[in-house]
Image (cartoon, grey):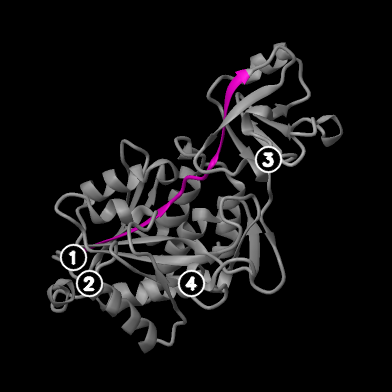
């Protein structure tokens, strides 16, 4: 399966934070032929080990990309069968009015998010954003039928199919951070053709969108020498300041900031230059808001890097990425891993 098809299946799947198990089989089956060991920990993180070429390798590199997505959750069922809901992770209520949804109850149920039509709004309401608590999900069923199929706490996802745009760009829901899972997949394929001394732990983490929880536990368990978070960055659009974004189609963003180890960052940039891989610099003074923030402060501290795939319209149902950025991020990641040896690791980690 090529990386684009893999990403399509990831995007079309359901993995709301806390309910990521819906993607477990797809991820494990896709990685198993190119890794040596796959385990799932008690929190649900999928840890996929690709062993290095040295039998007694003492180098461990952990690559983390979160497989969870933002979503909604059932919190009340009205007497007329309408569903009241809340958010799981960071959702802007302005982006969900009128959206089609899937309620993942005893079976997957199609519905729509409704609200008071503008004709019936009070004058004071017209210029205000509709609050989530004033929206409902309409399944078309009476309460008795809804109660048969839906329970309080059931997850809900926006219904949006992955599609190709023009050129190498694609759109879909939850490309944050299923694009990162796709980067790990592509990097794994690249590493099959490269020599690498380090044992590489590809980790599909859970619950990043609600507090980077999976990264904390998996990093503690693995205790890597190097941690690398693969996530998405804000793709540039006309209304956004250039200093806060990275351009699509120009390669991954290499993060610079307090979350990032300077020696490893310099090595990453050197590898990009050596192999003519396009890259951009992404300035983040404090914690990156990715799994990298959890990796860095686990145990006695883990030297950490962060690579970002440019993405437009983050945390909406129409996220857009460029597949060339996915490929270049994976290539940079693979060549960086290949460059790490027992001879140079200590020097790279020195401050």
Secondary structure at numbered mark 4: helix
Seen at 49% across and 54% down, the residue is 177
Closest to the camera, between mark 1 and mark 2, is: 1
Judged from the image, the secondary structure of the residue bearing numbered disc 2 is: loop
Q: Residue 11 location in percent, x, y?
A: 58, 51
SS for dot 1: loop
* Label 3 with label 2: CB-CB less than 8 Å: no
Residue with the mark numbered 4: 243
Can residue 202 be seen here? no
The circle drawn on residue 59 is: 1
> Spatial distance from mark 2 to mark 4, Cα to Cα?
37 Å
Q: Are marks 1 and 3 in contact (CB under 8 Å)?
A: no
- The N terminus lies in which quarter of the figure? bottom right
- Mark 4 and 1 residues: CB-CB less than 8 Å, in contact? no
Query: Residue 235, position in %: x, y?
Result: 56, 66
Q: Per the image, is 65 magenta?
A: yes
Is there CB contact under 8 Å for labels 2 and 4? no
Q: Is residue 140 found left or right of 137 in the rendered image?
A: right
Q: Report the residue marked by disc 2.
A: 197
Sooner in the amino-acid sequence: mark 1 or mark 2: 1
Indicate which disc residue 129 carries. Answer: 3
Contact between marks 1 and 2 (CB within 8 A): the answer is: yes
């Amino acid at each position: 399966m090529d990386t684009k098809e893999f990403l399509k299946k990831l995007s079309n799947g359901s993995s709301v934070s806390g309910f990521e198990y819906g993607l477990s089989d797809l991820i494990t089956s896709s990685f198993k032929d190119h890794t040596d060991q796959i385990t799932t920990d008690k929190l649900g993180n999928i840890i996929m080990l690709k062993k290095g070429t040295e039998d007694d390798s003492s180098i461990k590199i952990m690559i983390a990309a979160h497989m969870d997505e933002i979503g909604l959750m059932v919190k009340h069922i009205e007497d007329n069968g309408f569903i009241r809901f809340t958010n799981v992770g960071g959702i802007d209520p302005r982006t969900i009015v009128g959206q089609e949804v899937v309620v993942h109850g005893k079976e997957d149920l199609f519905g729509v998010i409704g609200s008071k039509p503008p004709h019936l709004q009070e004058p004071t309401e017209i210029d205000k954003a509709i609050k989530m608590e004033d929206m409902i999900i309409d399944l078309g069923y009476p309460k008795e039928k809804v109660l048969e199929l839906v329970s309080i706490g059931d997850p809900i996802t926006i219904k949006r199919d992955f599609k190709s745009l023009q050129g190498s760009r694609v759109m879909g829901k939850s490309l944050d951070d299923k694009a990162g899972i796709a980067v790990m997949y592509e990097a794994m394929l690249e590493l099959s053709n490269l020599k690498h001394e380090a044992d590489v732990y590809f980790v599909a983490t859970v619950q990043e969108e609600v507090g980077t929880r999976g990264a904390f536990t998996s990093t503690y368990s693995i205790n890597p020498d190097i941690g690398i978070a693969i996530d998405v960055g804000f793709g540039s659009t006309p209304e956004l300041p250039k200093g806060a974004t990275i351009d699509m189609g120009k390669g991954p963003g290499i993060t610079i900031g307090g979350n990032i180890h300077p020696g490893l960052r310099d090595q990453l940039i050197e590898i990009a230059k050596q192999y003519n891989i396009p890259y951009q610099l992404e300035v983040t003074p404090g914690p990156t808001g990715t799994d990298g923030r959890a990796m860095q402060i686990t145990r006695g501290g883990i030297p950490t890097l962060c690579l970002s795939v440019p993405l437009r319209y983050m945390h909406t149902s129409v996220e857009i990425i460029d597949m060339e950025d996915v490929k270049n991020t994976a290539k940079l990641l693979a060549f960086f891993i290949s460059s790490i040896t027992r001879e140079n690791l200590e020097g790279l980690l020195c401050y």
